Image: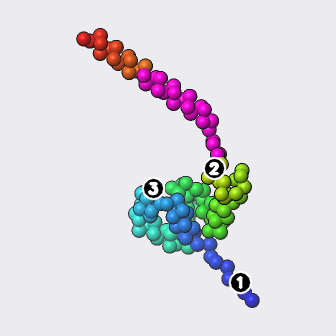
Amino acid sequence: MSTIIKPNHIGRKISRIRELRDMKQEALAQALGTSQQTVSAIENSETIDEEKLIEVAKALGVTAEAIKNFSDEAAINYFNNIYDNDITGSIVNAPYSNHCTFNPLDKVVELYERLVQSEKDKVEYLEKLMKLK
């Protein structure tokens, strides 16, 4: 019995990451400063030199190691585990869980302060107009 090991096809991994990031080849080409045909050639390549890999990784917003170690199974497991790690512990309640990365009250205060400043600017402008008449 023999086990066939799939080659580490870097081009396919780049293609999958690009697709998962909802990016077209043209957009990646523009980020790399190259043509869509060049991106297509990269994605069809089994290997890629390290410098180009780092450049592609930067354009995709990931690390070169993330591309090298990417697998569809790992990505699926990652997204499946999002619900497993939810506070509520169930998919049904997941949309109702709140994981703020900021204090909502701070945002309300910030918005109020911007509104007050806007009103002050408006009053100042109207007073200038009144003085001109």
Residue 68 falls inside the magenta stretch: no
The residue lying furthest to the front in this view is 92
Q: Is residue 72 left or right of residue 18?
A: right
For the magenta stretch, what is the residue range? 98-119
Give the CA distance from mark 3 to mark 2. 37 Å
Mark nearest the camera among 3 and 2 is 2
Question: In which quadrant is the C terminus drawn?
Answer: top left
Q: Is residue 74 above or below residue 112?
A: below
Label at residue 96: 2
Name the element at disc 3. helix
Dot 1 lies on which element?
Answer: loop
State the image quarter where residue 4 is shown. bottom right
Residue found 63% across the figure and 42% down from its top: 100
Q: Is residue 16 left or right of residue 6?
A: left
Q: Quadrant of the N terminus?
A: bottom right
Please tell me whether residue 100 belongs to the stretch shown in magenta. Answer: yes
Mark 2 or mark 1: which comes first in sequence?
A: 1
Secondary structure of the residue carrying numbered label 2? helix
Q: Amino acid at mark 3?
A: Ala
Marks 2/1: CA–CA distance:
46 Å
Q: Is residue 78 visible?
A: no
According to the picture, the residue beneath numbered tag 3 turns out to be 31
Q: Position of residue 22 (x, y in %)?
A: 49, 60
Query: Whole-percent x and y of residue 13?
Result: 57, 67
**For mark 1, what is the residue?**
3
In this rendering, the count of numbered labels is 3
For image coordinates 58% across by 56% down, the residue present is 62
- Compare residues 62 and 95 and report the one nearer the observer: 95
Foreground residue, 62 or 77?
77
Residue placed most toward the observer, 42 or 112: 112
